[in-house]
Each structure stands twice: as structure tokens, then as C-alpha cells.
Amino acid sequence: MKATDIPFVKHIGIEEQNDELSLDFKNDVLNHIKTIHASAQFTLAETQSGIHLQSLFPELEGKVIPVLRDAQIKYKKPAKEKIIAFSSTDEEAVIKFKSQFEKKGRGLLQIEVKIKDINDVLTCQATFIWFIQAL
């Protein structure tokens, strides 16, 4: 399943364009102080981490079950405009995951995500640890 087809992701309006995930500034996702709600930012970041995971290992699609094991997020600035997600993974972490997966059929992988608004203001940053198990 494509991450942007997940019902909740669709519900809040996360969009994918040019390999970027974004969320528009709109009433449906605002909080009580008229900024993008923390849970909407979390969902954007978590979805981006899942897409990043898929992009790292396209050959595993349909052969594994990835499950989010841990998440840490820090909100930096209010999101007052459209936000965009950016993800990365340390190359050493990828090598370690591949080794774990080859030996045990499962492993952990950490993915970093930054959310920035359209003016390049960092609104939050997060770390997601995925548990990936072979079917």
C-alpha cells in the first residue's frame, strides 16, 4: 500500500508531489491557536519516514512488515504555513540494518525527519525507529 493511500493520511490531506510530502495550511488541521496541529505534523513526519524506508529497500516491498517501534518528536516553531517533510538515514544505520536482516530476517532502522514550512522555518524534527520483519 502506498503511504499516501492510508485512510488517515488521506483524511488530513497529506499530498505527495515530486517525491515530497506536504500538508497545506487549512482549517481542518489547525489547533486552538490557529497553527498546524501537533498530531497533523506528527502524521506528516511519520508518513515521510515510512516512504523513506520504502525508498531505501524497494526490493523488500511485499516481503516484510514494517512497524513503527519508537518515535521522538520535538516541536520547534509554530507551523503557520504549508509544511513539507524531509527525511534522512545514516548510512551506517542502513548497513547495520542490512546485516541484522540478513542474519535474522528482522531488524531496526532509525529515520530522521525534519518538517519545514514553505519559508524554510523548522517547525519540528523527529526520529522514528522502525522494526522490519520478514514475512
Image (cartoon, rainbow, N blue to C red):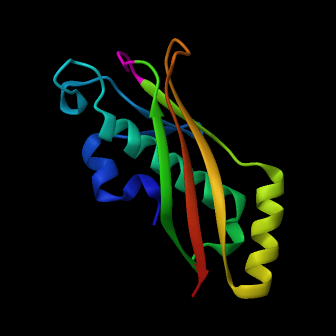
- Which residues are drawn in magenta? 78-82
Residue toward you, 131 or 48: 131
Instruction: Name the quarter where the N terminus is drawn.
Output: bottom left
Instruction: Name the quarter where the C terminus is drawn.
Output: bottom right
Give residue 130's quadrant in the image: bottom right
Q: Residue at x 20, y 27 (%)?
A: 31
* Percent x, y of residue 73: 47, 40
Question: Residue 132 magenta-drawn?
Answer: no
In the displayed structure, 105 sits above or below 1; it is below
Q: Residue at x 71, y 72 (%)?
A: 59
In the displayed structure, 96 sits above or below 12; it is below
In the displayed structure, 20 sits above or below 49; it is above
Residue toward you, 8 or 102: 102
Can residue 63 be seen in the rendering of this structure? no
Q: Is residue 100 left or right of residue 6?
A: right
Q: Is residue 81 left or right of residue 90?
A: left
Q: Residue at x 77, y 48 (%)?
A: 90
Residue toward you, 18 or 92: 92
Q: Residue at x 19, y 32 (%)?
A: 28
* Percent x, y of residue 23: 38, 32
Q: Is residue 129 left or right of residue 75?
A: right
Residue toward you, 14 or 31: 31
User: In the rendered picture of this protein, how many numbered marks are placed on residues?
Assistant: 0
Give residue 24's quadrant in the image: top left
* Percent x, y of residue 117: 47, 20
